[in-house]
Image (spheres, rainbow, N blue to C red):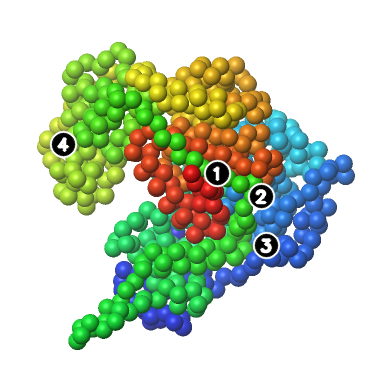
Amino acid sequence: MKELLLPVNKPTLPGYEAGSPNEVQDSSEFQRVLALNRRDWEAAAAHNDLYLRLTAAFKLPPGTQTLRLIQASALADAHDQRGLLAPVRVGEGKTLLSFLLPVVLLGIKRPLLLLPAALVEKTWREFKELQKHWLCHQDFMTRARFDSAVLTYEKLGRDSGKDMLVERRPDMIIADEAHKLRNRTAACTRRVERFMIANPDTVFCAMSGTITKRSVRDYWHLAFWALREKMPLPRTEVEMERWADALDERKVDAFSRRAPGVLMQFCTPEERAAVEPKRTAPLGRTQQMPVFQFSEKLVAARKGYQKRLRDSPGVVCSPDKNLDCSLVIRRLSVDPGAEVQEHLKLLREEWTTPNGDLLALPVDVWRHARELACGFYYRWVPPPPVEWVVARKKWHWFVRQILAPDGELYEDFRGLHLDSPMQVALAITQERIANPDIIRAYRDWEQIRPSYKINVVAEWVSDATVEFCANWAKTEGDGIIWVEHRAMGEKLAERLNTGFCSTGGMDAKGKTIEDYAGKTVVASVAANKEGRNLQAWNRNLVVTAMPTGSLWEQLIGRTHRMGQQADTVYVDWVAACEEQDRGFQQLMADAKYIQDTTGQSQKLLYADHV
């Protein structure tokens, strides 16, 4: 997968001229992708009765359900291509797809369904209901067989899960919520990758409403496992990186971004002409200079690639249409209190938490800012020994100087491509870092580190945000209050005399979030953002605005989905610090990238913002 396919030296396409090395060049892999068959499954589904024929083929006599057009098209593509990449948005019926895929693909004996742990019980309940309507694979018929045919991403990623795929020997892997496999360095992803390399005939079907976050890298390997030589991306990692450098959201600097180059051939001649460089009026005897709106060409390249992706057999994307139910997103400004503001100032200027801990990475600053915006911070009980604190601070100081772009040692170690404290430590053990002061700080910290075990408790400094959320629940009516932190969830649930649904979507008494049936409830984002049908509610309050567009798409889709009876769904978000506003700007940029490259309408973009 990693060998380089050499680029073609001369232009082979009409209208394309080889340009700067800093643009995507023509190659045999590009030619392969360009030549792939195209089909418009939406147009085809509108002119035939595929969904009726497949419904008749797999429905039981007493069954009353009917396949949707997108479900029928996905099943047909999976059958014809022996694999499936389905960026299908929330509420489009992925559970039924998971249920029927091993039935439709004849000869499948050992299907394996990959799921987040929080969705196992919900999926089994829904599978039992589906058994009344549809033919069922033998491995999904009883709870015992279901449990043996299901593997959670969490179990697969543990040390004890390293051999689970080899032991089960699946001939089909169905990855629901497949964005859990985005990170190729994660243990569960590496284990799936090793299995697919060793067993290339295994059918792989990936489904997710948020298959990408900010890069085509997020799903490149998923497309390879599912479609192999039919994937609408380069099969080599080197060339994929070049495409990503041109298309991704993560490259925000126009001067460091790779130009689309040959990728513009995915656009029509009219689309290419619309973004051709314009020329200024002559400046005396000076040569005319091109005026170029890079963002326009980027959008055109993304949309051209999107059409190539969506038209590829084996890829079934949700149709580009919005729900009849409108969506309103409102920013609600909150003053978290003077003491919180002082702590935030110290955090921003000195990267120091209220309990005196020196942070190493900007992401840590953002994480602690989100806590303080809620009105609390975590402190350690009992306090650590002074020697332990000094060693930790010294090590974190060096890590920050190495990793932060403004750090004193950043340029010295930039060539090592380090991006985390663990990688800095690994570079020391591999003797790639020879600085004696850094080595000494690392060894001192590693020696004293086991002597103290961190135990955190929430220290509240202001109830301003808690009271604001409580007042929202009283004035807006019943809704879901989404929280990131357990401390905030428990405090709000107590204040409102309701449940806090966390692990497994259940509260402390074992009551599921669905059991609250539209009443005010506090919900953990991590535990409930995926796979849950929460259309009984149409009002949401997000206490901390997580800066990731794909995560917001999942969260909003719990209530703004097919079947929602309300005319309008409201999603309010709390802005208690500047970090939350900057995070919201980033997630809007994420949503624009996802919509431009996959064609999935992003709720953040078509919502009315107040």
Residue topped by disc 1: 328
> Image point 57% across, 20% down: which residue?
499
Distance of label 3 from label 2 (alpha carbons)? 19 Å
Q: In this view, does 342 lie to the left or right of 231?
A: left
Q: Mark number for residue 324?
A: 2
Q: What element carries label 1?
A: strand
The spot of residue 415 in percent (x, y) is: 22, 52
Distance of label 2 from label 4 (alpha carbons)? 59 Å
Q: Is mark 4 on a helix, strand or loop?
A: helix
Residue topped by disc 4: 438
Residue topped by disc 3: 42
Q: Mark number for residue 173?
A: none
- Which residue is outermost to the right? 61
Name which residue type carries label 3: Glu
Name which residue type carries label 2: Asp
Marks counted in the figure total 4
The spot of residue 406 in percent (x, y) is: 19, 45
Q: Is residue 309 above or below residue 21?
A: above
Q: Is residue 555 visible?
A: no
- Which residue is outermost to the bottom? 285
Front tag of 4 and 1? 1
In terms of sequence position, does the residue under pointer 3 or pointer 2 come before the other? 3
